[in-house]
Image: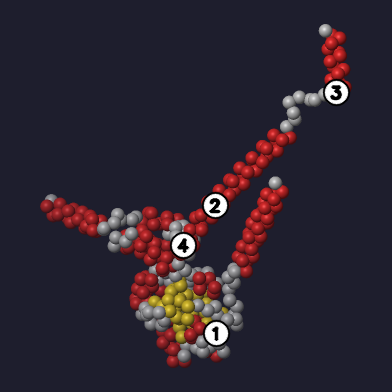
């Protein structure tokens, strides 16, 4: 009984030790699997069963156990495999364009749509018929005479 | 009103021209497998196991055997020892063997080279850009380059163990031309 208890304590310490030793919160394999691409099959690691993907996962596990942050692990993989290993482009430098261009495109399209709708509504207003049909002077005079006779 | 209309048309035309430009660029930059007898696509890649980079052009004047491999590739393990033996045999005739590690973790590649006793130079193609230029679809693949930097012989798709005759013919072709 005492031996079992000691084994449990030792196992708990062995698992808790490295986690407690990390200066930063430990990242997770599940998170990085969604951020890193499998270089041979061009899907994220979590959707790949390829040998290359499994080796990269094993490498990430080692780095996580060594308390590496997600950023540091990603940087190492970029150095190793190139920027194409990242599922999303980095938020810095030239790669920022990949984030801002689609947003700019959506805003420009919305602005164009709003302008188009505004111009369309204006043209409808301009083309709207006046409140009532206008009569020429002669007809109006004849109408007045008819109304006078009725009186 | 007319100015706005003209501006709109110019913007639309510019967008269409830009998209057409992208299409043309993509079509003209597609990688095509190199032809036998044509120049071997050049590259400069980081060495594994020793510092610095290696430029294929620096090997001009020597027959070169290019072997694309990866540590996660099971068939590559089966041919590593045969390639090492062949390198020891042909190096006396001036043949250079060059391993190109494809889509691999550097530490895994080092372990592989050490475990299989590979002593010929190896470079790392982590992004796979060089493999793409050679038209590599899966590892292992082996190419033969003659003294003038041209691809010779038929390149080997799969292990050289299974295609020992084709491998020997490829090395001889690189040596003789």
Residue matched to label 4: A93
* A139 or A107, nearer to the observer: A139
Q: Whole-Å distance between the Cαs marked 4 and 1?
A: 38 Å
Residue B99: assigned label: none
Which residue sits at x=80%, y=25%?
A: A134
Q: Are marks 1 and 3 on the same chain?
A: no
Which callout, 2 or 3, points at the residue further toward the start of the chain?
Answer: 2
Residue matched to label 3: A137
Residue matched to label 1: B149
Q: Residue furthest left?
A: A2
The chain letter for the residue carrying disc 3 is A
Q: Are marks 2 and 1 on the same chain?
A: no
- In the displayed structure, B129 sits above or below A134; it is below
Residue matched to label 2: A104
- In the displayed structure, B172 sits above or below A30; it is below
Of discs 4 and 1, which sits in the foreground? Answer: 4
Of discs 4 and 3, which sits in the foreground? Answer: 3
Name the element at disc 1. Answer: loop
Of discs 2 and 1, which sits in the foreground? Answer: 2
The chain letter for the residue carrying disc 4 is A
Which callout, 2 or 4, points at the residue further toward the start of the chain?
Answer: 4
Name the element at disc 2. Answer: helix
Which residue sits at x=46%, y=72%?
A: B125
Q: Position of residue A120 (x, y in %)?
A: 68, 39
Q: Whole-Å distance between the Cαs marked 2 and 1?
A: 48 Å
Residue A113, image quadrant: top right
Q: Is residue A64 left or right of residue A138?
A: left
Res B147 visible? yes
Residue B89, image quadrant: bottom left
* A38 or A111, nearer to the observer: A111
């Amino acid at each position: 009984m005492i031996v079992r208890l000691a084994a449990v304590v030792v196992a708990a310490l062995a698992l808790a030790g490295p986690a407690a030793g990390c200066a930063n919160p430990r990242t997770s394999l599940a998170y990085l699997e969604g951020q890193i691409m499998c270089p041979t099959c061009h899907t994220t690691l979590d959707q790949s069963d390829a040998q290359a993907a499994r080796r990269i996962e094993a490498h990430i596990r080692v780095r996580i156990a060594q308390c590496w942050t997600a950023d540091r692990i990603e940087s190492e993989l970029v150095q190793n495999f190139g920027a194409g290993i990242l599922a999303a482009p980095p938020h810095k430098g030239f790669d920022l364009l990949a984030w801002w261009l689609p947003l700019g495109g959506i805003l420009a399209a919305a602005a164009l749509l709003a302008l188009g709708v505004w111009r369309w509504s204006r043209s409808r207003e301009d083309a709207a018929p006046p409140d009532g049909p206008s009569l020429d002077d002669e007809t109006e005079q004849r109408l007045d005479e008819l109304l006078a006779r009725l009186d | 009103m007319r100015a706005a209309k003209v501006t709109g048309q110019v913007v639309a035309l510019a967008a269409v021209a830009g998209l057409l430009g992208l299409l043309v660029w993509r079509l003209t930059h597609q990688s095509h497998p190199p032809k036998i007898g044509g120049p071997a696509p050049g590259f400069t890649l980081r060495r594994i196991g020793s510092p610095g980079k290696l430029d294929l052009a620096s090997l001009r004047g020597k027959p070169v055997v290019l072997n694309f491999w990866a540590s996660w590739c099971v068939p590559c393990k089966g041919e590593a020892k045969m390639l090492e033996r062949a390198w020891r045999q042909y190096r006396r005739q001036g043949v250079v063997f060059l391993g190109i590690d494809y889509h691999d973790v550097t530490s895994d590649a080092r372990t592989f080279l050490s475990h299989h006793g590979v002593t010929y130079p190896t470079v790392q193609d982590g992004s796979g850009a060089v493999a793409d230029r050679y038209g590599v679809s899966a590892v292992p693949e082996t190419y033969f380059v003659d003294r003038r930097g041209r691809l010779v012989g038929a390149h080997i798709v799969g292990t050289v163990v299974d295609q020992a005759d084709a491998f020997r013919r490829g090395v001889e072709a690189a040596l003789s031309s």
